[in-house]
Image (tube, rainbow, N blue to C red):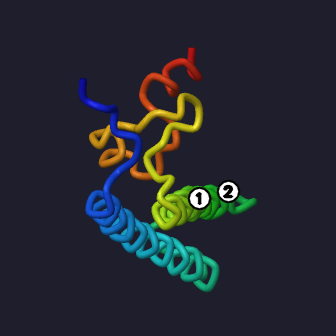
Amino acid sequence: MEKEKTCYSDAELLEFKVLIEQKIHIAQAEVNFFNQAMASRAGSSVGKDFRFDSEGSAYSHESEHLNQMRGRQVKFISHLKQALVRIANKSYGRCNETDTLISKKRLKAVPHATLSIEAKKAQLA
């Protein structure tokens, strides 16, 4: 009888680390883009391509949207950095609910996952 795997190997953890670092790099580039877009909107006068009502709602709607997208990326980066900490202490890939190993397929799709598919489904039920 084969013993169930309880943690990922150092080579597998390195593979996940590289994936996560790439995702952080991409997400940080998006945050920088949103920051520049918000700064340029704040520093510009009413653009020719926008029509504003008397309260400037088109401008505030777009600024709010940019800020929300930026916030999502910042939160995503935070989750990814927490995953890097779990890699460093070799607890990466363990389900917080079941204490079983999260599938490699799930971690490649959602590298910051802390729940197995089964635990996530149970949580949503």
Residue 103 quadrant = top left
Q: Is residue 17 left or right of residue 71?
A: left
- 124 relative to 62, above or below: above
What residue type is disc 1 on? Answer: Lys
- Please state which of the two labelled residues, at mark 2 or mark 1, is closer to the viewer: 1
Label 2 crowding class (10 Å Cα cut-off): few <14, some 14-19, many 20+? few
Residue 71 seen from this side: yes
* Point 59% across, 58% down: residue: 75
Q: Quick one: SS at disc 2?
A: helix
Label 1 crowding class (10 Å Cα cut-off): few <14, some 14-19, many 20+? few
Disc 2 to disc 1, C-alpha distance: 27 Å
Residue 48 place in picture, x, y as percent: 47, 73
Q: Which of marks 2 and 1 is nearer the N terminus?
A: 2
Mark 2–mark 1 CB contact (< 8 Å): no
Q: In this view, does 39 lie to the left or right of 20?
A: right
The residue where tag 1 is placed is 75
Q: Quick one: SS at disc 1?
A: helix
* Point 51% across, 36% down: residue: 115
The residue where tag 2 is placed is 57
